[in-house]
Amino acid sequence: MIGNKPYGIDSSGNFKVIERITREAVITGDITSNPHYRTSANHSRLFWNNISRQAFLYLNNSLYLLNPTGNGNLETRLILSDFDFDNLSIAAIYFDESNRFLFLGSITKGLFLLKREIFQTHKLPSDNADNVYYAQLPARNRAVLTAQGYLFSAKPDDSHVTAKKVSPFMEKFGYKFAMAQNRDSSFWFGIGSNLYKLDQTGQKILAHVKMPDSASSLYVDPTGKLWIGCDSDVLYILEESQGKYTPRRKFTLASKGVMIIDMKNANTMLLGTLTGIYRLDIRTGISQLVIPLENVAIRSFYTTPEGTWITTYGNGFYLLNKNKLVRFPLDKDRFLATSHCIIEDKNGFFWITTNRGLFQVAKKRLLDYATDNRNQVFYLYYDKQSGFETNEFNGGCKPCALTLADGTVSLPSMDGLVWYKPETITPVLPDKGIFINAILEDGKELPVRDSLEISRDFEQLRLTIATPYMGNSRNIQMYYSLSGQGRTEKWTPVNPDFIIPILKIPYGNYVLKIRKVSGFGANDYTYKTIKLHIPRAWYETWWFQSLLVAAMAGLFFISVRLRTESLVRKEREANLIRHYRVISQIIAAVNHDIQTPLHYIGYSLKQINAYLHKQSATDPLITRMSEESLNTSERLGALTKNFLDYIKLQSKTASSRTETSIFPVSELVGNISGLFAAIATFRGITIRNTIDPDLTIHSDRNLVSIIVHNLIDNALKASQSEITVSADIENGQTRIIVADDGGGIPQDQANWLNRDYRSYEDWLRASQRPDQKGMGLVIVKDLCVLLGISIKVIVQEEHCTTIILAFHTVEK
C-alpha cells in the first residue's frame, strides 16, 4: 500500500498498480532527471514503511518520495540528496511531510533526524570579507546591497545566491549603521561630518555634504526629504538647490543624541534619543517627551495603525499608543531583552531578532496583552539548528531588516545575512500530548496511572513528564498546579529537566494539572490531569479527632472545675476569716451586753424570791410571779449559753468541734425539762420524761443538750397538753424520741429534716441555699449532721409530731 492504493513489483523491478486489471504504474517526477535513472547504472532501491504507507526510491545518493497520482501512476519528489545510505546502513525511513522532518533508521548507527533548513545564511566567500552585517538596502532583481558595499543576488529559481564586492568606497569608508534610500533608489550614506549620496549600486558618488555637527542618524521621509539627527540637540534637514545640498538647522531639541528617526504620521515624527522618546510636530517644531527611557538604548521603531513598536537593548520591546507605553513580557530565558528589530509578515506574525536567536510571535496576542496583561503571549524560538551560522543578530542600524519584493526577508547577523520567506514557513508547534514517563515515590517506582494512591508518610513524589516535539526544546513551556485540600490553583513552571517534584503534603484528595502552551492562539493549552489520594494517618481519622476533642473538652471542664473549686476554697477561707471575726465580736457582745446582765438579773430574782418566801403575809400571786420570773431568767440564761456554745462551735476546726463522752440520757433530759417546767405549768402542758435512768449514749453532751433543748422548746410552742420524751434501743441504735400533740410540723420542714447528707461538707454546701425556716431547726439539723445523728420526723394523722434522734453506737 502506498497511500490508499495497492501496488506491487514484478521480477523486473517494474511497479504495478493493482486494480481490477493490473497494469504497469509509470514513474514520473524528479527521479527522471537523475543521470543514472535511464542507464544501466539504475540500481534504485525501494524503501517501504508499512505503518505510514510511504514508499521511497533511493538512487545515486538521492532519496525520492513516491506519491500516487489520480490515474495510478507514481510521481517522485526529491527530498534528500548527497546522502550515502550504504555507508550508514540505512534500513528504515519515515517522512513527516507537514514539518519536513526525515527520520532515517540505521542498523548500526542509530536514528538520524534530518530537518529542512527554513533559513539560509549567505556570506561573501572571501578570505578578507567582512561578514558582520548591519544596514542594508534592496537592489534590483532580488538583490541586497550591504553597508560594506557587498551585493547579494538571488537567481530567479532560488537555486543559488551570489555575493560580490561592488563598492570599494563603501568598503573602505567602514561605516555600517546608516543607509537612507531615496525614491530613485539612490541612497545617503555616512557618519560624523561627512555624508555621501551614492547611486543604487553604491559605486558612484553623486554628492558629498559636510555637516556642521556630527551626524548620528539618517531618515528619508515619505516626501523625499532627508532628516539628519546629530550627537548634539540639533535636528537638520537637507535642502537641494541646483544640484547642491545644504544642511539646514531645522529644530533645536530638548535632548541630545538622536539615534533613531521615524514618522508617526504626516506631521509627527518620533525621535529616539539618549534620554527617551520624543514626539516632534514638524509644523511647529514643538517636541514633547513622551516616555523617559534614560540609560535605555533604543534600537528601532516600527509604526503600525495600532501604534509604534519600539525595540531596546536590555529592556525588551514596547508598544507606544498615544501616551501609553506597554512593555511586553520576555521569554523565559530573557533573550528578548536585547531586541533589535521587528519584521511583520503577511500571516499576522512579528519576527524579532535578538542577540540569542530569532522569535516568532502572533501580533494579535501582543495586542491582547496590551489590552489586558493577564493574556498569555507565546514566543516561538529559532536558533542555529534552523539554518543560522550564529544566533547573534545585529541591530542598532537603519534599516534593521529588509523585506524584498518577493517576500524574502533579509536579517543582518554577526556571521552573514539570514534570508527566509515567512509565508512559506510552517511553524513547528509543541501541540502534541503530555505523557508521564515515570513516577517515583521516595525513590520507589510507581505504576503510571491517571489516579494514584500515595503513601501517607512519603517525603517526595517525582513525576518525569515528556511531550513529543521535534522543534527547539526552549519552545516547550509547561506549567503545573497542585490543587485540593484548601490549596488554590497556582501555576508553577516545570523544570528544564521535565521533572515535577511534590514535597510532603497532608492527607486528602489532590488534582495535579499539567498544561503546555501549544501554539499562538488565545488560551491555546494542552492539559494532563492526575488525581492523587493520600490516606489519613490513624491520628488524622475522624474517630481519633473526635476522641481528642472529647478529651480536650473533658480536660477543659476539669480544669475549669478545679479552678472554680480553688477560687471557691479561697473565697471560703476569706469568708471564714470574716465569719470568725464576726463570731468573735458576737461572743464578746453577748458576754458583755447580755450574759452579764442576765446573771445579775437572775441573782436579784433569787434574792427577791427567797425574801418573799420568808414573809408570811406575802400575796401568793406575787410569790408565783417572782418564781416565774426567776424561772424565765434561768431559761433565758440557758438559751443564751446554748447559743454561745453553738456560735463558738462554728469558729472551731473540724477536728475540735466535738468533745464526746458517755453520759446518761435521762439526767440530760431532766435538766432541760426543769428549765421549761414553769412555763409548761403556766400553759397547762405536761412534760413527761420516761427515759430509763440507766440508759447512756456516747456523744457530745453539750451539743446533744442544745439539740434536745431546741426540740422541747419547739414542742412546747406547738403542744396542746403533753410532751413526751422517751428513749429506746432499736437495731443497735439508741433513740431519743420527742413527741407532742400539737398541730404537726409543716411537711416541707419535715422533708428537709429527714434529708440525709453524705458528709458535713455536703450539708454546708446545701445550707448555703436554704429552703427551710426557723433558726432552731437549722441548729438542730446542723448539729445532727455534725454528730452523725440520724433525725427522723413523723407527722401522724392526728396532727401529732414525733422526732426521733438515732445514735449509731450504744455505750454503757
Image: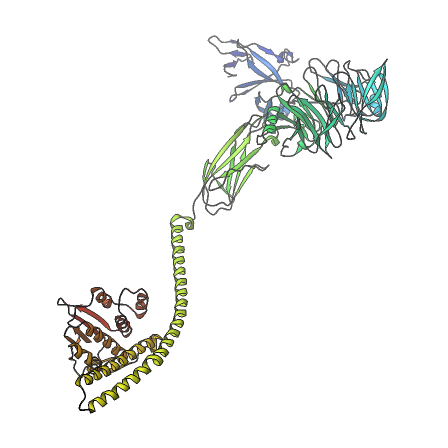
The scheme the figure's colours follow is rainbow
Q: Residue furthest left?
A: 798
User: Relative to 386, is 139 on the left or the right?
Assistant: right
Can the viewer see residue 731 in this picture? no
**Foreground residue among 71 and 480:** 480
Determine the image quadrant of residue 281.
Answer: top right
User: Relative to 85, is 723 on the left or the right?
Assistant: left
Q: Position of residue 770 (x, y in %)?
A: 29, 65
**Foreground residue among 308 and 117:** 308
Q: Position of residue 479 (x, y in %)?
A: 55, 35
Up-down relation of residue 72 to residue 612 (above or below):
above
**Foreground residue among 224 and 749:** 749
Up-down relation of residue 558 to residue 344 (above or below):
below
User: Relative to 234, is 749 on the left or the right?
Assistant: left
Quadrant in the picture for the C terminus: bottom left
Q: Position of residue 689 (x, y in %)?
A: 16, 80
Can the viewer see residue 673 in this picture? yes
Q: Position of residue 778 (x, y in %)?
A: 27, 70
Q: Identify which residue is drawn at 54% across, 33% down.
A: 466
Determine the image quadrant of residue 602.
Answer: bottom left
Q: Identify which residue is drawn at 69% across, 13% down.
A: 157
